[in-house]
Image: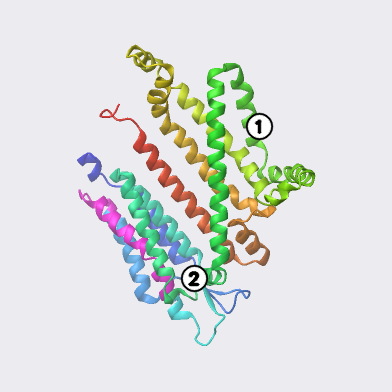
Amino acid sequence: MAITETLRPNRVIPVLGVLALALVWLLDLGTIQPNRIVPGTGHGLLSAVGWTGAGLVTGILLATIVLSTLPLRRRYELLLGLIGLSLATMPLLLDMFAALHLPEGSPYARSSVGAGFWSLLFLLSLMLIETLGRLEARRWLQLILLVFIGGSWIVLLRGEGLESLSLVREFNARPDKFQQALWTHLALALGAVAISAGLAFALALKMIRSPAWQRPLLGAVSFLQTIPSLAVFGLLIAPLSALSSALPFLQDLGIRGIGWAPALLALIAYSLLPMVRNTFVALTEVPESLADAARGMGMNEHQVFYQLKLPLALPVMIEGVRITTIQAIGLTAVAALIGAGGFGGFIFQGLGQAAMDLVLLGALPTIALALLADALLTMLAASLKPTPATA
């Protein structure tokens, strides 16, 4: 990074810091509920954590705002440490809130996270992304930071001080169901991505070898993408029910009108377009001059494809896998409506019971899985891009 760019005042972080400071004071940081059903009493920042906690949060945000405007060469490194540490220790605010306001002798009372806490978390995350971008941090550093913050949250949320947190109580009431939902969600999403990747590769090769197939195949996968997800799940129920009735051995395999089978087929259908398009574009955009040079060196067509075109096309192909994986992780939550399981079961159960913390128990892991997949696949694609030293 150039020195002039480093010393130039940052305009994004101060705006985000002022917005975070305003929202954390205006909105409720947390809520105390007598039980799971009765609406709770909201508490602002000062009421929630007292002068000590409020002063600490305000001081950190003011320090972030001021530090981002000072012409210091190492200010982004300092900002990275300050914001990263703040994000990693944010659950301590909830611990302080519960210790101050949770009534003793009330086993059913619980504390819930308020809009002010979520706003602070979101805006601090945006400031962290801006700081990493200014530092041009490598992917491994971003991954280490993500693991550090996530690990800190897991450790703090499993501590005794946050047992009364409503989200923690919802998890502790169903740990086995949560683990089952996790593996089901991963199996459906990653299974659909793996199958669609194989199909997309075969379809892309077919379009390259037979140009007449390009328009109909791309049109077909594009048409599948336009059908609403709920409609695809519903349309598959009748044919799979009829097929399992006609062939009883399919029922022994778990293939029915509802469950994992229609969910997997629908996810595969939705995953094909980005996979096929990126694979086809990646393989066809390799300069023909490079292929001619490889042939001039004595390579046959098989070697040209696997030793030249495929390695050069892999970063773009993985980008298609990244988009598809994130999409599949999100759509798998909808598959719970047809009995497929996964985190969507918690989401729809919480909506039916008006229990928002149960909704969060399904939504937050889904978001975390999508972010983790995005970080890992982006890092993989970046590592496979040819550099002047490897090209």
User: Between residues 360 and 176, which one lies in front from this camera angle?
Assistant: 176
Residue at position x 68%, y 54% in the image: 337
User: Between residues 243 and 293, which one lies in front from this camera angle?
Assistant: 243
- The magenta stretch spans which residues? 68-96
Q: Which residue is mark 2?
A: 30
**Image side of residue 15 versus residue 183, left or right:** left
Q: Amino acid at mark 2?
A: Gly
Considering only vertical position in the picture, is 174 above or below 368? below
**Image side of residue 78 versus residue 234, left or right:** left
88 falls in the magenta region: yes
The span from disc 1 to disc 2 (Cα, nearest Å) is 45 Å
Of the numbered discs 1 and 2, the one sitting upstream in the chain is: 2
The answer to which quarter of the image holds residue 2 is top left
Q: Tell me the tag on residue 223.
A: 1
**Secondary structure of residue under mark 1:** helix
Residue at position x 58%, y 35% in the image: 272
Point out residue 286 in the picture as x, y percentages from the top left corner: 41, 22
